[in-house]
Amino acid sequence: MASYICKGCERSCPTANALRMHQERNHINGQWLCGIKKEKRSNKTKLKEAKLKVAELDPITVMEKVNDSSKTNELLEKIIEQNNDLKDKVAEISQENLKHKADMEKIMNQNEEMKEMVTEFARNPKLLVLVDKLYPIQSLKEIDLKMPAFKPVLEILDNELPEYANLAQEKTGKIHCKAVRKLNEIQPTTVKDEEKLFCKDGDVIIKADYIDTTKEFIDVIANSGFEYAQKASVDLKSKRESDQPFKRTILQNASCDTIHNIQEIVI
């Protein structure tokens, strides 16, 4: 016997005519309403079955399950919290490790510098005398050129600088270097041995950097109110790539013959 099945709800009809009538009633706007109705009936059946199962459960057992579930959630929350604490501790340890690494690198660099200085002392014993001859490089920040001791430096700057002084100009650079040399003569802070520069950091003789030392002396004069030095100090702090040639010119003009040779200090 032929069977006529509805595509929407899979209902079996006894005749083709019965199937056609069923489809005409239930196929509207491209949707099989009979299929939707079947799904709703199925869902209602499932819901009814679920309610029956719940009704059959022992209330005490249900409460125990709920309590167990709550305890599980609390345990999960504690684990998550502990995990977050652990992450924070790991991050903190990582930061400490980075700091220790930086400290170790600093110590290693200091050890290398000490080795170099021991070699320099062995090469030129006169360097040992500088401990008593030089002022600490930090003392430059305390200098006031208006003090009587530095009057010769002021006289050079007041009387010989051009009207529109600028360290980018060679003429200004020569007068500046003359003043710095006089300053370093009155209060020795840096000396030169061949092409190497030395200063005293606290109570320790160390190698000095030409650029850093030049900037230190520019700042001394800038702090005493000389505009050309103040402008140069600001210009040297520029990070723009286009300013680098200009900065090199300033540093070159400000560092010519400013440092005494060690023989002039150690007599």
Image (cartoon, rainbow, N blue to C red):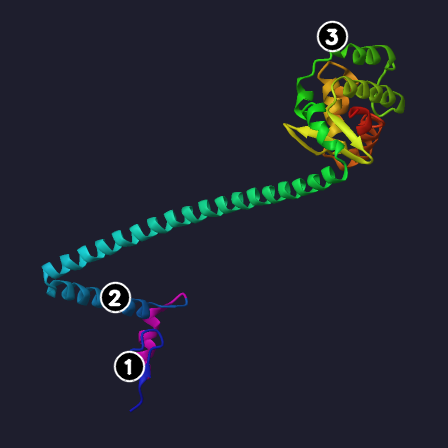
Q: Earlier in the sequence, mark 1 or mark 2?
A: 1
18 within the magenta span:
yes
Please, what is the three-letter code of the amino acid marked with disc 2?
Answer: Asn
Q: What residue appears at the point 33 percent right and 48 percent down from the top-left corner?
A: 81
- Rounded to the nearest whole Å, what is the CA distance between mark 1 and mark 2? 23 Å
Residue under label 3: 148
Residue sitting at x 72%, y 19%: 220
Q: Quadrant of the C terminus?
A: top right
The residue beneath circle 2 is 43
Picture quadrant where residue 232 is located: top right
Disc 2 and disc 3: Cα gap in Å?
103 Å
Instruction: Residue 215 in the image: state x and y as whole percent.
Output: 74, 27
Dominant secondary structure, magenta: helix
On the question of residue 82 being in view, the answer is yes
Q: Is residue 140 above or below residue 43?
A: above
Eye-nearest disc, 1 or 2: 2
Query: Which residue type carries mark 1?
Result: Cys
Classify residue 97 as left or right of residue 167: left
Mark closer to the chain start, 3 or 1: 1
Q: Is residue 228 magenta?
A: no
Instruction: Identify the residue position indicated by label 1 in the image.
Output: 13
Point out residue 32 in the picture as x, y percentages from the top left corner: 35, 69
Q: Amino acid at mark 3?
A: Pro
Q: Residues within 10 Å of mark 1 (few under 14, many from 20)?
A: some
Q: Tell me the magenta residue range.
A: 16-29
In the image, is 62 to the left or to the right of 247? left
Observer-nearest of 14 and 46: 46
